Each structure stands twice: as structure tokens, then as C-alpha cells.
Image (cartoon, rainbow, N blue to C red):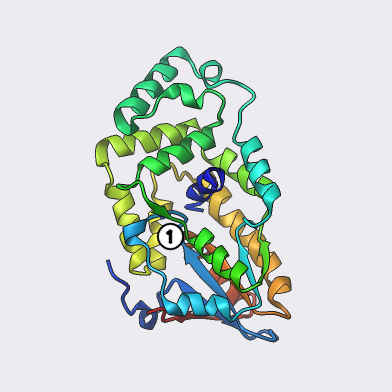
Amino acid sequence: MKILKTLAICLLSSISFSSLAQQNESLLWEVSGNNLEKPSYVFGTIHMICEDDYIMTETISNTLKNVDAFYAEINFADPSNALIMQQMMLSETPLSKRLSADKYAKLKTLLNDVVELDINQFENFNDSAIASMITFKSFPCTDFKMYEMELLQIAVAGNKELGGLETAAQQMKTLSKSLTMDAVFEMLNELKTKGYESTTEMVNLYKTQNVSELYNFMKKSSYMTDEVYNEMLTKRNHNWIEQMPKIMQDKSVFFAVGAAHLGGDNGVIKLLREAGYSVNPVNIN
């Protein structure tokens, strides 16, 4: 479970609910038309959230209960994914060997002073795994909820078909390209100067269902260079859109992806519309 949590944190692909569906903003979107036999749905998740901020409405859960299949970014129900993630979080070269003495010393100080973590525990982990653990520390709580896991439980209880839009290996490869040691230092320095400010902003945007601003928030993140943005969001969105038509052609599917993947010119919502589908917000209150 800890491994699955670590993966989910990285996918940032993450106030009370308001009636933003009327303003073309929502976390849940109905996909119809284009010869679909049944409507499908896309739900934007925040992969990790403090338990006190977690909200699951009846509309969200009932929508999932009434579809035929549940697809997340990867199939968390497949036990082989845990092993793949565990293996791909490790590094063949120890941390103390792949960093210069100066960088190692700086990282050691930052980990200890900012997030109270001992650098020795990361000796055999790769950079993306280290970034994931830092993300845990960027939240002002220790009790977490994970939407993918909560949704998976509902789907399993309802005997839904389960699947993923990409493999665990594909996702971990993307994270390894994107969450480098530069990203680790950026995240630690931001936490040092801003504390929980960025995380609080992200959570508030999510809870107000502001998909457009969530996209903008991710794009301006300290570690989100053009290359990282292209790897983590754009490429994956286009890959998913290639698969989704076949998956939902003859059945109703509840897709759960990071909310930052929904907005923007290369977001899932616009790409589905460009593919000929009608995509409309659902009021989840």
C-alpha cells in the first residue's frame, strides 16, 4: 500500500464544494455522442489529500456504481503493479555515489531541516522516489485519503471491470524522466520558503472544482519545466485519448485521472471534444 501511495502522490499526475458545474467547471464530466452506446465519465482526482479535506458526494459514488467499468491511470487492482513500482523506485547507483559531495551535503541538510528526513533512508532509491516522499511531507497532516483507492473499493464492491490507461512501467518511466534531482531540490527549497502554502492552494482549487486553475497551478509548479510538462501531461493525455474511444465504445466507463490532466489546450476534456464527443460538466453536489 505504501508503494501504491508513493506512486499516486507523484501524479499530481493534489473549502466546501460549490455549484461550479453551472460555470463549466467540475471534477466530473459526462462523455456522450460520437456513436457511444452509453455515456461514460471522466473524474479528476487529487491523488492525495488530507482526510479532513476529503469529500465524496453521492453523485460521484452513484455515477461509479452505475457504470460498467472503472479505469484509473493504472490498474491498481493488478498485484503485479506493486512489484513493478517497487523495482522501478530503486537505483542501481547509490545516492551518495551519484551526487557530488557538495550536492549530497546540501540535500542532507535540506532533508533534515525542511522535512525531517534522514538522507540515509534514500540511499538506494531513485530521484523520483525521493521526490514522492517529499510530497508526503508537503501536506499539513499525517492522515491521508487517496481518491483512486477509495474509488477502486467502490468499483470492486460493484464487480466492475477494472483497467488502466497506462502500465505501471510506463508511468514510472515518465516519473523517472520528470522528477529528477533538480526537481527534488526545487521542491525542498519551495517548502523551505513557502511551507504548506502551495499545497493549500492546490487543495483549495481542487475542492472548488476549478479545473482550469488546477491546470495552471501545475504548469507553474517550481519543477514544471517545458520538458517535464510535456512528459507528465501532454504526452500522456494524447496517449490516453487514443485508447479511450475503444474502451468506452460498447460500455459505460468511469475514468479517474489527475485533475490537472483535464484542463488546457492539450487536456483530456478538449481532446475528447476534438475527437467528436460531447463532454459536459456534471454537478456533483
Residue 124 at least partly seen: yes
Looking at the rendered image, the quarter that the C terminus falls into is bottom left
Q: Residue at x 45, y 45 (%)?
A: 224
> Considering depth in this image, is 147 or 18 the residue closer to the camera?
147
Looking at the rendered structure, the secondary structure element under dot 1 is: helix
Specify the amino acid type for callout 1.
Tyr
Q: Which residue is labeled 1 in the image?
A: 215
Spot occupied by residue 121 in the image (x, y as percentages of width and height)? 48, 25
Image-quadrant location for residue 241 = bottom right
Q: Does residue 273 sit above or below 92 in this rendering? A: below
Check disc 1: other Cα within 10 Å, few if <14, some if 14-19, many if 20+: many
- Direction front: furthest residue: 157
Spot occupied by residue 202 in the image (x, y as percentages of width and height)? 35, 56
Q: Does residue 103 sit above or below 285 in this rendering? A: above
Residue 264 at least partly seen: no
Spot occupied by residue 113 in the image (x, y as percentages of width and height)? 30, 27
> Considering depth in this image, is 206 or 160 the residue closer to the camera?
160
Q: Residue at x 47, y 57 (%)?
A: 146
Q: Residue at x 40, y 61 (%)?
A: 214
Q: Does residue 148 sit above or below 86 in this rendering? A: below
> Considering depth in this image, is 231 or 157 the residue closer to the camera?
157
Spot occupied by residue 96 in the image (x, y as percentages of width and height)? 51, 17
- Direction top: furthest residue: 101
